[in-house]
Each structure stands twice: as structure tokens, then as C-alpha cells.
Amino acid sequence: MSWVLALPIMIPFVTAVLAFLLRRSRMGDLASVGGSVASLVAAVVLIAEVLDQGVIAGQIGGWQAPFGITLVADHLSAAMVLITAIIGLSVAVWSLAEIGPTSARFGYHALFQSLLGGVTGAFLTGDLFNLYVWFEVLLISSFGLLVIGGRKSAIDGAVKYVTLNLIATVLFLAGAGLLYGATGTLNMADLRGAVAASPDQGLMTLIAMMLMVAFGMKAAVFPLFFWLPASYHTPHYAVSAVFAGLLTKVGVYALLRVFTLIFVGDLGYTHEILLWVSLLTMLTGVLGAAAQSDFRKILSFHIISQIGYMVLGLALMTPLAVMGAVFYLLHHIIVKTNLFLIAGVSQRLTGSSDLYAIGGLYRTAPLLAALFIIPAFSLAGFPPLSGFWAKFVIVRASLDLGEWLVAGVALLVGLLTIFSMTKIWAEAFWKAHPDGRQPALADLPRSARWQMMVPIIALAVMTVVIGAFPSAFLEFATKGAEQLLDPAAYVAAVLGEARR
Amino acid sequence: MNSLILSVGARFLTALFLLFSLFVLLRGHNSPGGGFIGGLIGAAGFVLYSFAAGVEAARQALRVDPRAIGVWGMAIAVLSGLASALASLDPFTGLWLILADLALSTVLVFDIGVYLAVFGAILTLVFALEETL
């Protein structure tokens, strides 16, 4: 059992070592792709196991919970691991076309795979301190990936990113230390009982707020998001695509996990704050995007506004709302990564990411235009694409609670998202290129064309499939939400039946 | 930085840092310490040396590319975790080899891997930052 849980984490690290040792030859690139395929297989095995048996847990080193480090997979974790593997493989293939020998020699593929390993570890761990360790792994590898371009602006963005994230991790560490001092355990399933039984509920709420700020900064919620637009538009497109898809979602996942499993003692306080934070996140993100004119900067601000929807689902804390958050999380990762990959192709074809300096893609690269429409409309919430169902569920959940303001904000933000997407469409795709360039996919070398377009098409197909056949995915998300809101199965899987 | 005291002192301190880091690494099994903090202390020694003598001199004193140290550390750590598969135990279960008074284990191997990974990663970052800024 433990190996099923450990292998999705270990494979990326083994791949990272291989890719580093082979970094001087083309074999390093292939090692990265091969390792990503292996990760995907391991993730499929894991999710099959979870679908078959429900929540599964394994103890690292054979040390029983709550003393050892536990790995746990419920529906949410297993789905996140699978989607990480899908994004990992897509971007690994896409990287072949973008990452040149200089970055490869610096160790791009090794850093990329350690990042994927760190993300997977964060999704699977059942131990709060271990989660902190994975955050550090993420921070170190993402810093490496940010500076790998080596430009001055990249360093500038990376330093902001690292400084703010270090503050978050220090807060996390302090919170975890306090929690350990107060309850004597860091196993998340064990903490559920220990926190509820603690005589000092005020201290527990304080710790909850420390963790909320720490995870909130990782997730880029209002008012802690400003590191994100400062750093996401500088690195390689492959790097920003995988960051956009996965990094902030680790923060959202941590919020979802901790604020359904551990800190549920003072919902009126913690989740009320989350509610206002989510509304402001949605609004500031989408308004920030409206003021931008750079392809990647617009997309970066939209990450923030979309994070708001997910946190909103958590804040409402009804089964429907949490289900919406889970579904939103899964749909958003695919869509956002794809948009950044498309931005990368558009930059390659037109020579810039400044929307006022590019254009003409619709006429000369209609395939790219069609592929942009799918994730862009999905992001804005057009039926029948995946984003429609995600927004529908969240809005429906807020209406069920009689939260008219919340529903109104959610719909307004959707409308403003269309505004930004229309802007990209009008500038990059519709109008003619200001320099009279005729950007066409045929300009790309044959191999690069395949390496770039196949992942984009695959992710677009997934978006369409989720949108066209939502019931299976919604059912899965419902099950995931049930497990989050009633973690009895989670606790039992970790601690054994007796301690439930 | 042009300080005579620092540049003379750094040579001794770097050696001391490295020695202490090994001590912390080895005592980590049953007492506070271990690979992570040991690696940090060791890296701090070389960071100090790079402040005193420059990054170029620190790289030469290290002899090996810090990235390679980090990656090999990661490889050692992962392999020590995979070793328990041969004994069909849970991942990362400690396997022990007792030679009279000397107890060797995959746990120690893991810690050495972590030491090298942290040491290499920190030095890669710090050297890169010092060179670009």
C-alpha cells in the first residue's frame, strides 16, 4: 500500500537525477519526458486504487501514525496527483520546443522534475511538518526555474517571489511549532481530534490564522498576491505554465485540507474571513487584469481572480460549495496551463507578448486561434465548457445560502473575465500585425510544431470532454467534497479504526 | 569586502563549520541534528568563505560543482528509500547492518543524502545570486 503512495513522489526525483546527469545531451530531455510518463502511470494506479478502496494511507518507514510520516490519498489528493502528472507530461513535451541547450545544461529538467515531485508530495502528505518540507522543496526548485533565463527582470521577479514566500514559510513553521507545542502532534488526522479537544480554543484560532496567511500567500489571495504578477511574466513560458497551473493550487489545496480537516472549531470566524478574502481576491484579480496589456500579465492576474472562486467554495463550506471548489481546482489547472502554453506559441510566432505589438494570428494561424477560444471561454465560464459547470456550482451554492452579494460578485467577475479574454482576442488574434508580419504555425520547425501543439490540443480536448460530460467529474468532485466535510474515513485510514 | 580579519578568519571558520556540520549530521540519529541542519551549517561555512575570498575562490575550494553535489545527494536519499523494497518493507524503512559496536543503517545513508542535497542546493543558489547581483 505504501509504495502505491510513495512512488508518485519518488519517480520525479529519480527522473530529476537522471535528467541532471544527462543534461549535456538530448537524452536529458527524453529522460524528463520518460519520467513524466512513468509518473502518469503511477498516478493512474494510485487513483484506481483510491476509486476501488476509498481513502488509503501508508506509513513511511513503517513508523505507525501519529508518530511517523503518513502519506494519505483520498479522492481530492489522488485527483490532484493525477492532474499534476498530466500537466507534468504536457509541459515536459512542450519544453522540448522551448528550452534550449543553455537552460538544459543549467539543469532545467532536473529542477522541473523536482518541482513536480514537491507538488505531488504536498498533495499526498498527511503530516503538517512534512507539508512544510514540500513547500521548501517547491520554493527551492521554483526559484531555480525562475532565474534560469538569467535576465535582469527575471532576477528581480525571483527575489520578490522568494522573499514573500519565505515570510509565508516562516509563518507556517511558527504556526506548526505552536501547534506541536499545544497538542503534541503534527499528524493531520490526529490533529483533528487534538485541536477539537484543546482547552485553549483561542490559541487554536490564532494558529489557524497564521496558517491561513501562510497558505493564502502561497495561493495568492487578496491582499497577499502581489508577488505573483511580479514574477510570472519573466521566466520561460514552460516554467510560467507549470507555475500557473500548479504552484498556487498547492496553497489552495493546503487551505482546503487544513480548513476542512483540522480547523473547523470556529467557522464563524475563520470562514467568514475566507469569504471576504475570496470576494476581494476575485475582484482585484479581474480588475488588475483589465489594466494590463501583456499576454502573460493578463493571464497572471486571472489566476488570482480564479483562486478567489476556489477559496469562495471553501468559505461557504456547504457540500455543494466544497464540491464546486474541488471541481474548480481540477478544471482550472488544465485551462490555465493551456492558456500559458498558447501564450508561449503566440510569442514565438509574433515575436512579443505585448498585445499592442502583436496581431494577425486569427488570419494566419486559425488553429491556434481555435485552440485559444476553448480555454479562454472555459475560463470565463461559457457553456458547455468545463468552466461553466465550475462557476455554475459555486454560484448555485451561494444562492442556496441566500448570499446574493456573493453570487452577484461571482457573476460580475465572470463577465469581466470575458472582457479580458476579448481584449486578448481582439489584439493578438483579430487585428493585423502592426509590422505586417504574417505569423503562421508553419514558421515553426516541424518538430517544434508537434512538441508545442500536441500538448495544447490534448489539454483543450480535456477541457471539452469535462464540459461535455460533466456528470462523471461532478460525481467524483461530490465524493471528494463528502470526504473533506466528513473526514471520518480519512482519520480512520490514517489512525486505524480503533482511534476514530 | 576588504577586511583582513574576515579573510584570515574565514579560512579557519570554514574548516570549523565543516567539521561541526559533520558532527551535527552524525549525532542527528538520536539527538537534535541530522542531514538538513548539517547541510545548512556546512553550506554556511562556504558562504562565509565566498564573502571573504569571492565566489570564484569558493568554487575552487569546493572543487566540485555544487549542483552535482546536490543532485547526487538527492540520488543517495531516494535510493536509500528504495532499498527497503528489496526487503519488501514500507518505503524508507531503516535497514540495519550491525558490525560489533558499529551500527550502520540506510537511515544514515538517507541523512547523508539529505546533507549533500541541502549543501549543494544552498551553495548553488547563493553562488548564483552573488555572481548575478
Image (cartoon, coloured by chain):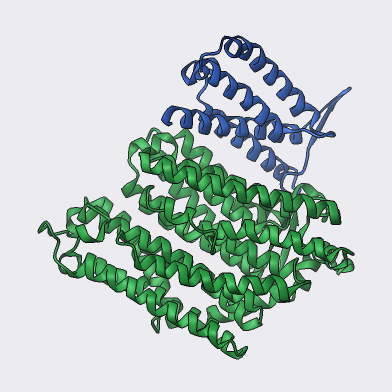
Chain colours: A green, B blue
- Image quadrant in which you'd find residue A362: bottom left
Q: Position of residue A156 (x, y in %)?
A: 42, 42
- Image quadrant in which you'd find residue A301: bottom left
Left/right of residue A496 with respect to residue B10 in the rendered view: right
Left/right of residue A241 with respect to residue A344 in the rendered view: right
Q: Quadrant of the C terminus of chain B?
A: top left
Q: Is residue A499 above or below residue A416?
A: above
Left/right of residue A201 with respect to residue B19 in the rendered view: right
Q: Is residue A44 visible?
A: no
Q: Is residue A358 above or below residue B71?
A: below
Q: Position of residue A454 (x, y in %)?
A: 33, 61
Compare residues A170 and A145 and report the one nearer the observer: A170
Q: How many marks?
A: 0
Q: Is residue A405 visible?
A: yes
- Residue at image position (75%, 67%) is A263
- Residue at image position (79%, 67%) is A491
Q: Position of residue A100 (x, y in %)?
A: 32, 41
- Residue at image position (63%, 26%) is B44
Residue ranking furthest to the left: A436
Compare residues A334 and A391 and report the one nearer the observer: A391
Left/right of residue A274 with respect to residue A237 in the rendered view: right
Compare residues A429 and B86 and report the one nearer the observer: A429
- Residue at image position (57%, 18%) is B49
Q: Position of residue A418 (x, y in %)?
A: 35, 76
Q: Is residue B18 above or below residue B75?
A: above
Q: Is residue A418 above or below residue A88?
A: below
